[in-house]
Image: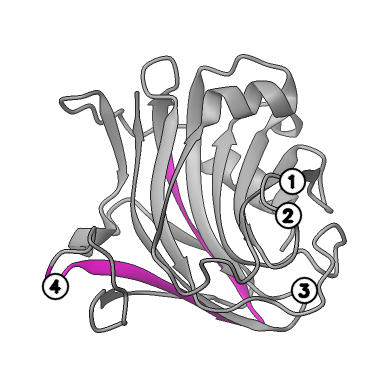
Amino acid sequence: MRPSVFLQTLLLITTLFAPVLSFAGVVSKVANFSEGDLADWEEKSFEGNSQYRFVDAQTAGINSQEIKDKQQVLRASTQGKASGLFKEVNIDLTKTPYLNWSWQVQNLFKDNDEHSKEGDDYPARIYVVVSGGVFFWNTKAINYVWSSNQPVGSEWPNAFTGNAKMLAVRSGEKQLGQWVTERRNVREDLKKFFGEDVKKIDAIAVMVDGDNTGQSATAYFGDIFFSD
């Protein structure tokens, strides 16, 4: 999937930003997937449509102490297609720099070079986007990905644009089919990747895409929030 197009699209829709949602403990909630809520999320198609729908976690076979009875999760799947769900936000990274989410990946892509345009597909990813304002070429993004083959902790520029950086949070078959919780300091990651002390996030997106490899994948996403 071509993230340069995705970043420009997100830029156009973030002229008016959603308010920061603050709760006790300094938490900014981004996604209430556990409640089957897609309010303010929109789908953007790049090459056909990935499939996004809510399912009961236990019915889907997700076993975790974090999962409550009859809790919903977002099921994301692709059969050689690419679309993402995005949401405009206004996250103050000086107050809530940590991105928290949970996910489960069911299968990986085979023999794809994730450093190349032909292999730029991931069974699961979460974008954080910093708008460049009217200068769309200054828009920046970090892709937190479940890589099919790159080592955990490895990082590389996206094959389509240098303004999107890729970070392998999980990789390969280790913990495949397991419900995993993640926590990343986005402010520090932005400093590391772009050399700037970015104080605000303007959009976030989740995606499963297989358009470049023509392969299929399925993943599940839980709630997403920022915290201190």
Badge 1 or badge 4: first in the primary sequence: 4
Task: Give neighbour class at mark 3: few <14, some 14-19, many 20+ (Cα, 10 Å).
Answer: many
Q: Is 56 left or right of 135, judged from the image as shown?
A: left
For the residue carrying disc 4, how many other residues have a C-alpha within 10 Å: few (<14), some (14-19), or many (20+)?
few
Task: Indicate whether residue 78 is drawn in magenta.
Answer: yes
Q: Residue at x 25, y 53 (%)?
A: 32
Q: The residue under label 1 is which amino acid type? A: Ser
Mark toward the start of the polypeptide (3 vs 1): 1
Q: Which residue is mark 1?
A: 154
For the residues marked 3 and 2, what is the alpha-carbon distance in whole angstroms? 21 Å
Does dot 4 land on a helix, a strand or a loop? loop
| Residue bearing the label numbered 3 | 212
Mark 3 and mark 4 lie on one chain; the one further toward the N terminus is: 4
What's the amino acid at mark 2?
A: Pro
User: Nearer the observer, disc 4 or disc 2?
Assistant: 2
Q: Quadrant of the N terminus?
A: bottom right
Residue 126 x/y as whole percent: 53, 51
In the drawing, what numbered circle is on residue 151? 2
Q: Which residue is mark 4?
A: 70
Residue at the spot x=13%, y=73% of the render?
A: 70
Residue under the image location 54 percent in, 62 percent down:
207
Q: Which residues are magenta?
A: 69-88
Q: Kindly check if marks 2 and 1 are in contact, taking CB atoms under 8 A apart as contact.
A: yes
- Say whether residue 86 is magenta: yes
Residue 169 at x, y = what percent? 59, 50
* Cβ–Cβ under 8 Å for marks 4 and 2: no
Query: Please, what is the three-letter code of the amino acid marked with disc 3?
Result: Asn
Picture coordinates of residue 162 (x, y %)? Answer: 82, 40
